[in-house]
Amino acid sequence: MTANSIPAPRHTRRPLRASATIELASLTVLLVNIATGNSQQIAALFGPVHGTAWLFGILATRRDPHRSTGATLRAVIPGIGGLLALRALERTDTQAAPHTGPGAR
């Protein structure tokens, strides 16, 4: 059994999941801020939070042992890239895992 055939535990992607959630939430706050009056204080607070979460999501995706080029490219998309990369990584895990349902040998 190779290292690539072993599925990654869910808890190893907890930082990526957290950064993806923060990335999306901070983008939502920034867009609502623009729509409602563009407060400079809110932009000054949530802009760096969003940027940091976005960069962390890219790095967390790159460090995942089961990453693919597609997952890494998805992580680069601002706002929802972390969630898309997480979904791609989990899909890769389910495809690599052996079938253990009824009828499996």
Image: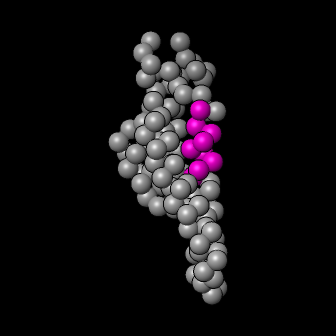
- Location of the N terminus by quadrant is top left
x 51%, y 60%: residue: 51
- 10 or 38: nearer the viewer: 38
x 42%, y 15%: residue: 2
Percent x, y of residue 49: 59, 61
Percent x, y of residue 72: 40, 45
Residue 50 sits inside the magenta stretch: no
x 50%, y 21%: residue: 6
Q: Does residue 40 lie above or below 26 as drawn?
A: below
Q: Which residues are magenta?
A: 12-20
User: Does residue 24 appear anywhere in the picture?
Assistant: no
Percent x, y of residue 76: 41, 54
- 63 or 103: nearer the viewer: 63
Q: Residue furthest left?
A: 69
* Picture quadrant of residue 13: top right
Percent x, y of residue 10: 62, 33
Way the structure is coloured: one colour
Residue 17 sits inside the magenta stretch: yes
Instruction: Report the number of discs.
Output: 0
Q: Does residue 66 lie above or below 21 as drawn?
A: above
**Which secondary structure type mostly characterizes the magenta part of the structure?**
helix
x 64%, y 75%: residue: 42
- 41 or 51: nearer the viewer: 41
Q: Does residue 52 lie above or below 33 as drawn?
A: above
User: Does residue 41 appear anywhere in the picture?
Assistant: yes
